[in-house]
Amino acid sequence: MNGYEVFVKQMGGLLENDRKRIKEDLEKSLKEKGKEEAEQAERIASAKEKNVVAIANSYAVYVREECKRNPDFNRQVMADWKSAPRMLKFVRNRAKEIAFDGMAMVADHCVYDWVNEYYFLDDKEEVYEQRRKEAEAKAKAEAEAKAKAERKAKAKAEAEALLSKDEAYQNSTEEEKKKLLNKKVNELVAKAEKSAKAKEKREAKAKAEREEAIKALENEASFNNADDKEKEKLIKAKIKEIKASKKKKKSEPVQPSPVQLSPEAKARENIASNAEAMANVERIRQEAELPETKEFQQMSMTDAIMG
């Protein structure tokens, strides 16, 4: 299989999705509109489909010719981390960069330059990281769905066992029994989910504490040269040490932050200080029984301010 065949296969999947979306939009539109409007909606849907096919064909023709002409391009198109959907997204983003009022008039050669730019772009690690995250998210969702189903099954069995001993339940009608059973199941499921969330929170906290301890130890030779068993001991000791340090810091009284005065408050404070200084000058003059002179005020001002 060459690069062109790989590209056509990928574009085929995209075309199928686009056609499905256009068909769904049309069916929805036909339910909401009258006969005349429905005919117009069908014409629009048909034009959209033709446009999608024409665009796909133009890309396919370019990729086919470029794969023939350039072995490096052919190899890049076949790369595991390259795909037609990502290429189209890359081209659309480039067009948005030069768009005006949401519209961009782009010449074909510019579009094909962007196609080349995408296929020679080094995004291998980015794509693999994205795939890893998607796989993790999918696995997590599946695990959560499985756990939820198991909790519900367990809750149902427990609810049935509890209600089988309840006289009021036993004397109820089938409809009432069903309601009581569902209520009890929902109560038990809610309790189990609350417990599961608390456990998940504890595990996340323990994981964060472990990572913090390892980071603190990673530059210590005694840790790096230790075997796995000894490393575990050092990690546990460091976790304990970090916890104790945080607990001690938390128990220490918090020192109040210095008050930041506004310019207006600072001005009022300066006026008050100057008034106090002048009062000190006057007090000193009176105590010394000196005449009131401008020179005396100037000489004594510094002493008065200093205390």
Image (spheres, grey):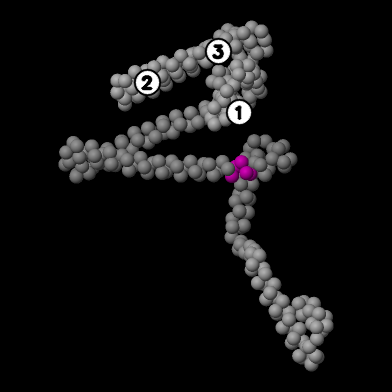
- Badge number at residue 58: 3
Instruction: Please name which of the two marks, 3 or 1, marks the residue nearer to the observer.
Output: 1
Q: Is residue 124 left or right of residue 25?
A: right
Evaluate if marks 1 and 2 touch, with contact meaning CB atoms under 8 Å apart. no
Name the kind of residue labelled 2 in the image. Answer: Ala
Query: What's drawn in magenta, residue-wise?
Result: 209-213
Q: Check disc 1 and report the residue beneath it.
A: 98
The residue positioned farthest toward the front in the image shown: 36
Evaluate if marks 3 and 2 touch, with contact meaning CB atoms under 8 Å apart. no
Judging depth in this view, the residue of 63 and 220 nearest the camera is: 63
Q: Position of residue 19 (x, y in %)?
A: 43, 17
- Callout 1 crowding tier (Cα within 10 Å): few <14, some 14–19, many ≥20: few
Q: Position of residue 73 (x, y in %)?
A: 65, 13
Q: Is residue 190 left or right of residue 139?
A: left
Residue at disc 3, secondary structure: helix
77 vs 32: above or below: above
Q: Residue at x 36, y 19 (%)?
A: 40
Q: Check disc 2 and report the residue beneath it.
A: 41
152 part of magenta stretch:
no
For residue 185, say whether it is visible. yes
Residues at marks 3 and 2, CA–CA distance in whole angstroms: 26 Å
Residue at disc 1, secondary structure: loop
Quadrant that contains the C terminus = bottom right
Quadrant that contains the N terminus = top right
Residue at disc 2, secondary structure: helix
Residues at marks 3 and 1, CA–CA distance in whole angstroms: 21 Å
Q: Position of residue 59 (x, y in %)?
A: 56, 14
Main structural element of the magenta stretch: helix, strand or loop?
A: helix
For residue 132, say whether it is visible. no
Q: Is residue 241 left or right of residue 147?
A: right
Name the kind of residue labelled 3 in the image. Answer: Ser
